Amino acid sequence: MSGVTATLSLLGVAALGVAGVYGAAWAARLSSRPVAAAPFWSGLEPAEHAVSRFHVRWYTVTMLFLAFDMEMVFMYPWTRVISATGPGAVIEMFVFLAVLLAGVVHAWREGALRWT
């Protein structure tokens, strides 16, 4: 019976927490009306809706960006342990960079970076 009481107590605390967050958001709101399409920092009126579709070429550029972003994620710890692991770590990193370079060369040869 105590398990049921504990479960109901936990659900009650969770419900109070959610209600508290919603209440704080309601109390802190500035206006109940949504803001119309207004320029944000750049000063230009928006030309299209914020959730409009992008051209398919942007996805290739995004994948290349993410690949090189992940390269940096892997290179930082590598620089921290390179002296302890020895020359094998250098060879592994150059193999990793060669795979990334092969991906860029492939995308370039396929015309994925051509904007005409």
Image (cartoon, grey):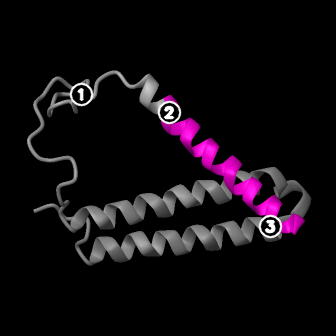
The residue indicated by pointer 3 is 4
Q: Nearer the viewer, residue 60 or 88?
A: 60
Q: Is residue 57 magenta?
A: no
User: What residue lies at 21% left-to-right and 26% top-to-bottom?
Assistant: 42
Give the image location of residue 91, x and y in percent. 72, 71
Q: In the current view of this chain or complex, which residue is farthest to the front?
A: 1
Callout 1, which amino acid? Phe
Q: What is the number of the mark on residue 28? A: none
59 left or right of 70 in image: left
User: What residue lies at 30% left-to-right and 70% top-to-bottom?
Assistant: 108
Which tag, 1 or 3, sits closer to the chain's start?
Answer: 3
Q: Is residue 17 magenta?
A: yes
Q: Nearer the viewer, residue 46 or 31?
A: 31
The residue indicated by pointer 2 is 23
Category of crowding for the residue at label 1, using alpha-carbon neighbours closer than 10 angstroms: few (below 14), some (14–19), many (at least 20): few
Badge 1 element: loop
Badge 3 element: helix
Callout 3, which amino acid? Val
Residue 89 image-quadrant placement: bottom right
Q: Which residues are magenta?
A: 1-24
Magenta span: chief secondary structure: helix
Mark 1 to mark 3 CA distance (whole Å) = 51 Å
Mark 3 to mark 2 CA distance (whole Å) = 28 Å
106 left or right of 72 in image: left
Q: Is residue 72 above or below residue 59?
A: above
Give the image location of residue 39, x and y in percent. 18, 28
Callout 2, which amino acid? Gly
Give the image location of residue 109, x and y in percent. 28, 76
Mark 2 to mark 1 CA distance (whole Å) = 28 Å
